Amino acid sequence: MQTIVTTSESSRRPDQALDDFKRRLHDYASIGRKLFWQRFTSYTAIAILASIFYDWQVTAICYAFIWISEIYDQRVFSIALNPDKFEKTGMRDMKRKLLISTVLSACVISIFSIVISILQGPTSHFMPIFVLIAASIFACMNNYQFVSILFVRLSIYLVSIVTIASRDIILAEEVTSEMWIQLFTTIFVLSFIVECARNFLSFYTEKIGQMKVLEREHERAKSAARAKSEFLSIVSHELRTPLTSIKGSLDLIIGGVAGPVPESFRKILDVAHRNSIRLTALIQDLLDLQRMGDGKISYQFSDVKLDELVSEAVDEMMTVASRRAVTIKLGHVDKDVIVSADKNRMKQVVTNILSNAVKFSNANQTVTVNVERNGQKGLFSIEDQGIGIPDHEKHKVFSAFQQLDSSDHRKAEGLGLGMHIAARIVEAHGGKIGFESRIGQGTKFYVEMEQVAANAPTSSHKAVAPAL
């Protein structure tokens, strides 16, 4: 077993190393390209000063070599940022190009600084040393993606700085205290540069580690979501077929197709029939949720009269409400509100809200349904006189698999998907769903949608909306 695990781990290491290299390379090239104009300004300013105060011909030659190295850098950045070019080049060749680019640019800047120090003669050499120190700090801040690249670049700069600082001491006929001060000060600054490089490397390595952890957690979350979606799909489809058969058989028996039903059996059959209907609705909710998660629901939009849509849903809910001794009544109904909607899906929204209102209403209470206008929007509201929603439960109303406990005992049935699905459907229609509730005084849900046109004839034109 250990051999198998070790082999599996070793087979994954090349891919992990390649992914890590690509990430670091992309960061390196992105920063390098982003800072092009900053480098251009610095190089040009230094060249102008050197040409004015020292030798313009030598400066021009050095400046030309700087831009040759810059052109090569840009070519390397182009390959690094283009996946197709990178695949053709390969990781090993890319590492070689990075090394050449680093050595070329660092050597050109170092030679330029050393040449300036030679032209200056015995002096403090502030300008060339400042250029190299600035380049070293710049490298620490922007070339920390690859330890080897940063090490090579800093080594070239640091050797050049020490060369400039110690050259006067070696060649001078008389060594002054100022020369020693410059050398020791330079060494002190070098230790600061090394510490900067260490800190930037540590910070970047930590950031890479955190990103890898986040990516692993993201993959786990996606796997869990896929597993949940597949589970819901399989369970829902496997249950729906036998349940449809059971419900159909109960319909036939209760309808008397198989002969008269004894009264002693009727109550049991009614209970079984109601539960089969409830289970069918639950399975449909699960399927809808799964399709919404997969983005497989489409909508057939047409111009719909909102009062007709709501009235049809109310009629379908009357039987359920009567069993609970709850009355559903139409209040104010504006018959001229027309919206663009998928009629069946919006009827599902009305049915879900009505079902919720009936569930949380007590016997002999009334659920009132209104259809009206709110400026340029069409609106329907469903208000019950039930137990209301506590403030600490309100954030759960439109969440999936959340069933509210608004009383001493939970009497409502279901998986807590109805309001979540309703909210998703309204969102897909570009509408707004909300509610107002007080404990012991009831709850009012409302849905707002854009009107098509007042008094406009109903159109049969249909269009498929993008999937959720």
Image (cartoon, rainbow, N blue to C red):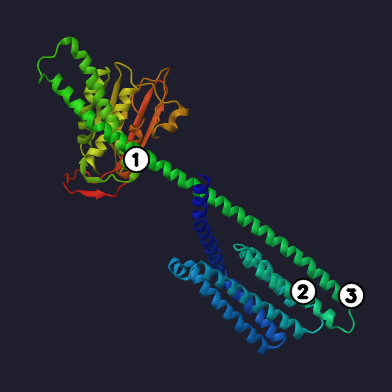
Q: Looking at the image, which is closer to me, 44 or 13? A: 13
Q: Position of residue 405 (x, y in %)?
A: 42, 23
Q: Secondary structure at mark 2?
A: helix
Q: Nearer the viewer, residue 297 or 89?
A: 89
Write the residue at 61% across / 72% down: 102
What residue is pinned by disc 3? 177
> Going from the N terminus, do you reach mark 3 or mark 1 first?
3
For the residue labelled by badge 3, is the local secondary structure a helix, a strand or a loop?
Answer: helix
Residue 350 visible? The answer is: no
209 relative to 433, above or below: below
* Residue bearing mark 1: 230
Q: Amino acid at mark 3?
A: Ser
- Gap between marks 3 and 1 measured at Cα: 80 Å
The answer to whether the residue labelled 3 contacts the one labelled 1, judged by CB atoms less than 8 Å apart, is no
Question: Which image quadrant for residue 183?
Answer: bottom right
Of circles 1 and 2, the one toward us is: 1
Q: Residues within 10 Å of mark 2 (few under 14, many from 20)?
A: some
Counting every numbered tag in the picture gives: 3
Callout 1, which amino acid? Glu
Mark 3 vs mark 2: which is more N-terminal? 2
Query: Is residue 97 at least partly visible in the picture?
Result: yes
Q: SS of the residue at dot 1?
A: helix
Which residue is pictured at 39% across the width and 24% down the height? 388
| Residue designated by label 2 | 162
Nearest-to-viewer mark from 3 and 2: 2
Contact, CB < 8 Å: mark 1 with mark 2?
A: no
Q: For the point 41% across and 18% down, which residue is it?
A: 409
